[in-house]
Amino acid sequence: MDGGSLGTGLSFNDFFLAVLIGNLILGIYTSFLGYIGASTGLSTHLLARFSFGTKGSWLPSALLGGTQVGWFGVGVAMFAIPVQRATGIDTNTLIIISGLLMTGTVYFGIKALMVLSAIAVPAIAVLGSYSVLTAVDSVGGLAELKLIQPETPMDFSVALAMVVGSFVSAGTLTADFVRFGKKPAGAVLITMIAFFIGNSLMFIFGAAGAAATGQADISDVMIAQGLLIPAIIVLGLNIWTTNENALYASGLGFSNITGRSSTTMSIINGLVGTLFALWLYNNFVGWLTFLSTAIPPIGGVIIADFILNRKRYHDFANAQFKEVNWAGIIAVAVGVAAGKFIPGIVPLNAVLGGAICYAVLNPILNKKTAIAQEA
């Protein structure tokens, strides 16, 4: 949908420039987190204990977990509403069935994600590519597509923020998925491929058809192209994989807070997201906008602490944590302010604001702890 918005709001050259720059920033940011995850074997929420403290880590866990539950509910509704328009099946029935199916899959954990992705990713790639080729052909070729000018031009800085913001929230949870990697270098490579190349392709899939048809939603584009059944399939698979990742990540987050198993929390989160799917779809945009500013500083703080205190991460079982590390909490608040008030790319400013503030503040507030550890 972001790709569709960019496709209808930017010229051909500006679109590719925004997508490549934005996803390069996103790839570098997530690669840092991927390296940390694979180096330590720890989830994002366990990593947060080093920089936020045991109870202080509840803040990032709540923000990250809450975002993913919200995204799950929004995703269920995003599937049900266009399918209802296309088929006439009751929206609430579609929400309940699809929500329960998506929740049921997460019970099987990371293995289910691997199987589902092995099916979904090639299907999305094939159908997305076919949609792009159809769109190019419908306007008379690539040269004609390049000539299409947006009716309502989008500011380039807004477009860049949209590209980075498209996955910066879930990208902050990168460690949750690549912590099983055998080598940190492999995790970095996979992460760069996923966020730089893979995410760029997703934008292209959305933009080409949008530019040709004037509609931003990929499902509407494919329906306009006479691809009703493939549209339902690609929409369902796309949202299913995203929602499975959201539930898995949210389960880890709320497990850190409650002490219950991540599988149990994932199932509870899925039921909550399904129950409030329509409400979330209609009211969650403002909350997500806030969280897109609030979440990047968390990643910045985790990266900064790992760079500055890497030796602490070698032995998690015997590591000593503060209950609350106020340097991390304050750094997140500063990062949010940097994203909101400093001109530029909002998520990037938020990441750098949080990281720099933590690097300065942590040694000052925890000077005694540092001296004790050195002794």
Image: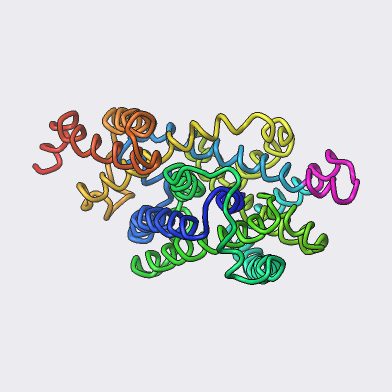
Q: Give the residue furthest to the right.
A: 88
Quadrant of the image occupied by residue 121:
bottom right
Quadrant of the image occupied by residue 105:
bottom right
**Colour scheme used in the picture?**
rainbow
Residue at 50% x, 41% y is 253
Q: Residue 246: percent from the left, percent from the top?
A: 58, 47
**In the image, is residue 89 part of the stretch drawn in magenta?**
yes
**In the image, is residue 39 part of the stretch drawn in magenta?**
no
Q: Is 22 displayed left or right of 84 in the figure?
A: left
Q: Residue 231: percent from the left, percent from the top?
A: 76, 59
Q: Chief secondary structure of the magenta span?
A: helix
Residue at 10% x, 37% y is 371
Q: Residue 302: percent from the left, percent from the top?
A: 32, 44
Quadrant of the image occupied by residue 143:
bottom right
Residue at 51% x, 48% y is 166
Asked whether the viewer can see residue 115, the reply is no
* Number of numbered labels in the structure image: 0
- Region rendered in magenta: 80-97
Asked whether the viewer can see residue 132, the reply is yes
Q: Is 113 displayed left or right of 315 in the figure?
A: right
Q: Quadrant of the C terminus?
A: top left
* 178 over 352 or under it: above or below: below
Q: Residue 234: percent from the left, percent from the top?
A: 72, 61
Q: Is 156 displayed left or right of 209 in the figure?
A: left
